[in-house]
Image: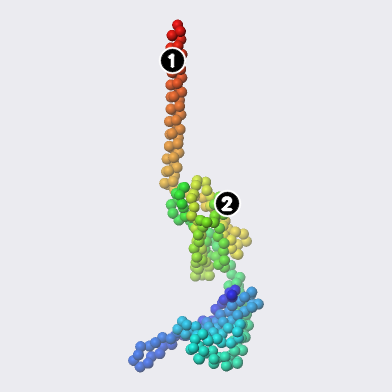
Amino acid sequence: MCGISVRVLSVLLTLGVCLCSSPPEDFVYQYKGQCCFRNGTENVRGLDRYIYNQEEIAYFDSDVGFFIAKTELGKKHFADYWNSQKDLLEQKRAETDTVCRYNYQFDKPDVIDRKSQPNVKIVNSKTLDLEHENLITCFVDGFFPPMIKVTWLKNGIEEGEQVTSSELLPNGDWTFEIHVMLETTIKHGDTFTCRVEHSSLQQPISVNWEPDVSESARNKMLTGIVGFVLGSIFIIVGLVVYLRSKKTMTRFSVVQNENLMS
């Protein structure tokens, strides 16, 4: 496997051929030069690919040292002829040094050493509803290189089974983004943390999120509290009435007994 691949040259040539009154036909011929760096410049592999109408017909592999045909067209018109050219083969074999290793020093700061720190934001994807399933999303974007670790913690404990993730999404400016979702029930007082680990950071980023109880949840909570208070009042009033009634009955019974004894 190549640790990194850098395209050093790409040529797209479209040829239009018009024969008499026939409509023109388009032929697409492409050449792609690639450098694969394994362990820096210690082990470099050069690849030259020749493509005709979106089909690769022949290629040069520096690990092999000569051209290899992939189709009959590539063998007849390219590989066999180029392999017979000693000077051309020597030039291609030398390109791992003259092209790949030479350009590595210029591309390394922008490709190998380039780092961009991630931005982290937490969003609740639907209306918060206590005691029911909620979907919380940690948006992480603007980071490079693409290797990253995103972890959800609930009340300080790492979540696993309820966590899902989007694919790594390229932003088109050499940076990436990823969405990591946590589906969970939320209780009053729960705290959530999205922790991000990336090579551009000296230490992980931890973004905390505390649920903002929705209006409906507040109403339910307020209704429950009011109901509890009213219920407690009725119980207390009933208990007082009962005790007073029992005390009155006791006094009445004592008075009756005294009258009978008299």
> For mark 2, what is the residue?
156
Q: Which mark is residue 118?
A: none
SS label for mark 1: helix
Q: Is residue 203 left or right of residue 167?
A: right
Q: In the image as oriented, which residue stretches furthest toward the left? A: 21
Mark 2 surroundings: few (<14), some (14-19) or many (≥20) residues within 10 A: few
| Coordinates of residue 19 in the picture (x, y in percent) | 37, 92
Q: Amino acid at mark 2?
A: Gly
* Quadrant of res 59: bottom right
Q: Residue at x 55, y 67 (%)?
A: 146
Which of the two discs, 2 and 1, sits closer to the camera?
1
Which residue is at 39% across, 87% downward?
25
- Residue 50 x, y percent position in the rendering: 51, 84
| Label 2 secondary element | loop
- What residue lies at 57% left-to-right and 62% top-to-bottom? 149
- Can you tell which mark lies on residue 252? 1
